[in-house]
């Protein structure tokens, strides 16, 4: 699965689980999930659970940082790197 497909699945998850009450909010791929109030600490754990179950990627505790899971693009890159998915330039 390529990075764009991963990104689309992540976006669908976020839209369905976090943005359903904010239909007018536009979340960019590089917008901070926590900084924009999309997810809180419990939401971050839900995201990690989704990543692990949906993509088979184990998110190690020391990777639970804004650097790895702060935006949709960062999460998609994290998944792609751990699954050997292609990342188009």
Image (cartoon, rainbow, N blue to C red):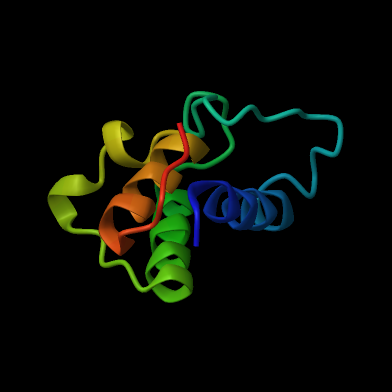
- Residue 48, given in percent of the width and then of the height, sits at 39, 59
The one nearer the camera, 59 or 82, is 82
Residue furthest to the right: 24
Taking the image as shown, residue 34 lies to the left or right of residue 59, namely right
Q: How many marks?
A: 0
Question: Residue shown at 57%/25% (left/top)?
Answer: 36
- Residue 84, given in percent of the width and then of the height, sits at 30, 59
Question: Residue shown at 59%/55% (left/top)?
Answer: 5
Residue 58, compared with residue 15, is above or below; it is: below
Q: Quadrant of the C terminus?
A: top left
- Residue 45, given in percent of the width and then of the height, sits at 39, 57
Taking the image as shown, residue 68 lies to the left or right of residue 13, namely left
Question: Residue shown at 27%/58% (left/top)?
Answer: 82
- Residue 18, given in percent of the width and then of the height, sits at 66, 49
Taking the image as shown, residue 73 lies to the left or right of residue 17, namely left
Q: Quadrant of residue 53?
A: bottom left
Q: Quadrant of residue 51?
A: bottom left
Residue 72, compared with residue 52, is above or below; it is: above
Question: Residue shown at 80%/38% (left/top)?
Answer: 22
Taking the image as shown, residue 75 lies to the left or right of residue 68, namely right
């Amino acid at each position: 699965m390529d990075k764009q497909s991963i990104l689309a699945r992540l976006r669908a998850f976020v839209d369905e689980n976090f943005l359903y009450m904010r239909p007018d909010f536009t979340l960019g791929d590089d917008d901070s999930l926590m900084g924009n109030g999309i997810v809180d600490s419990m939401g971050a754990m839900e995201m990690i659970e989704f990543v692990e179950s949906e993509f088979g990627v184990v998110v190690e505790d020391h990777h639970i940082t804004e650097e790895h899971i702060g935006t949709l693009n960062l999460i998609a890159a994290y998944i792609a790197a751990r699954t050997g998915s292609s990342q188009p330039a």
